[in-house]
Amino acid sequence: MTTALPFLPFTKPTIDEETIAAVGNVLRSGWLTSGPNVQALEAQLSDYFGGRPVRTYNSGTCTMEIALRIAGIGAGDEVITTPNSWVATANVIIEVGATPVFVDIEARSHNIDLDKVEAAITPRTKAIIPVHMCGLPCDMDKLYAIARKHNLRVVEDAAQAIGSTWKGQRIGAFGDFASFSFQVNKNIMTGEGGCLVLNNAEEARLAEKYRLQGVTRSGLDGIDVDVLGGKYNMTDIAAAIGLGQMKHLTEFNAKRKALAQHYFAAFGQDFEARSGAELPIADFENSNWHMFHIVLPERIKRSEFMQQMMEAGIGLGYHYRAIHLFSYYRARGFTDGMFPIAERVGKQIVTLPLFPSMTEADVERVVTAVKSRLS
Ligand SMILES: *Cc1c(COP(=O)(O)O)cnc(C)c1O
């Protein structure tokens, strides 16, 4: 009889005792909703993003919806995005009454193919929502050149990209809107949550209004509601978790990068040629290594592969199924074959375990298990 190794999930948050104590202090304080911790977290995030205004929310989905509302995008407008993302990225476009226009992805980066974007622009196109997939940034020079040329707003879905850089500058520290998620799987988390990086004080004022029912102050003791807003504010409980996570962000990202480097070393130079599988782009300069994926060769059935890995005590994810093939999107006219690269990736991709408390031995265990099933 062999001793089974402990189950290895594809991701897991790292939470220190200080953070747990800080949450206890919030609960004891009696002030649980948005308060001093939210303010402190927003101030830290603003520093992190080069002094730009930042507001926090209860998800990294409503952040994108609010950015679209601030930009005045709605019925009759088209927004270009990628079919290879969490469905939130496209849902928010429909949520504000606009129409999503998908552009296929690049085969290797899995980011939107910027060379195909201009062909999708019409007189109704108002914005583009690119995703920095797994923390690997899109080509920011190309992206903003297209946006400037066609007068488009950009809402960067940077949900996965906190700490990623482009030519030495942090994603979110430059550009137009940048939306980050603090959902529990992300590089730092607040249980659920997110933040939006904005361009100026006027946008920040609107970002607060849309966060809380459209309420605006008027007169000395009065309020008014002059736009339709939602209920999207972050609690001080969540913000206390975020403050605890911020202390470790640099260290978490460094650990992820080291583990990703170890994955490449363990797979070895000839893994792709031998197996027909595809590894991620080995970018150790810009990416925050939010996830480490492999795209399985056509001959391998993903569900069977995932089941076999599960039997070996290794949990995998898949990020993501192509958005346009979900029933709701098919009902809007999308079909198979429209975005072939996103479809192939969506069918064959798996996410391997990668999180800060993993060890190099864990990485080797995963690589051995993958190789034994692919060779
Ligand atoms: C996590 C994620 C979102 C959504 O964030 P939530 O905080 O779960 O709402 C959106 N887009 C991408 C690419 C994500 O990874």
Image (cartoon, helix red, strand yellow):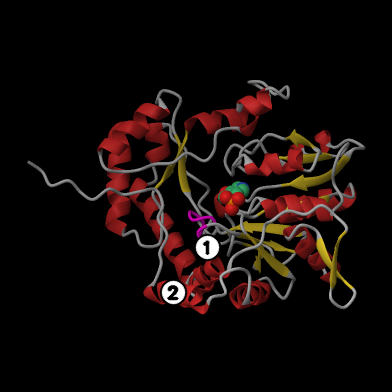
Residue range of the region highlighted in magenta in the rendering: 183-191
Q: Vertical placement of 238 versus 309: above or below?
A: below
Taking the image as shown, residue 78 lies to the left or right of residue 135, namely right
Q: Closer to the N terminus: mark 1 or mark 2?
A: 2
Q: Vertical placement of 308 versus 266: above or below?
A: above
Amino acid tagged 1? Thr
Instruction: Say which of marks 1 and 2 sits in front.
Output: 2
Residue 284's x, y, as percent?
A: 52, 59
The disc label shown at residue 190, or none: 1
Does label 1 point to a residue whose CB lies under 8 Å from ligand 1?
A: no
Q: Indicate yes or no whether the magenta region holds residue 358.
A: no
Q: In this orientation, does residue 368 appear?
A: yes
Q: Which quadrant holds the N terminus?
A: top left
Q: As rendered, which of 193 and 320 lies closer to the eye?
A: 193
What's the residue at 52%, 63% (across, down)?
190
Give the Cα separation between the discs numbered 1 and 2.
15 Å
Residue 162's x, y, as percent?
A: 59, 62
Residue 199's x, y, as percent?
A: 80, 66
Q: As rendered, which of 147 and 125 lies closer to the eye?
A: 125
* Pointer 2 residue: 24
Within 10 Å of disc 1 (Cα), the crowding (few <14, some 14-19, many 20+) is many
Taking the image as shown, residue 329 lies to the left or right of residue 160, namely right
The disc label shown at residue 176, or none: none
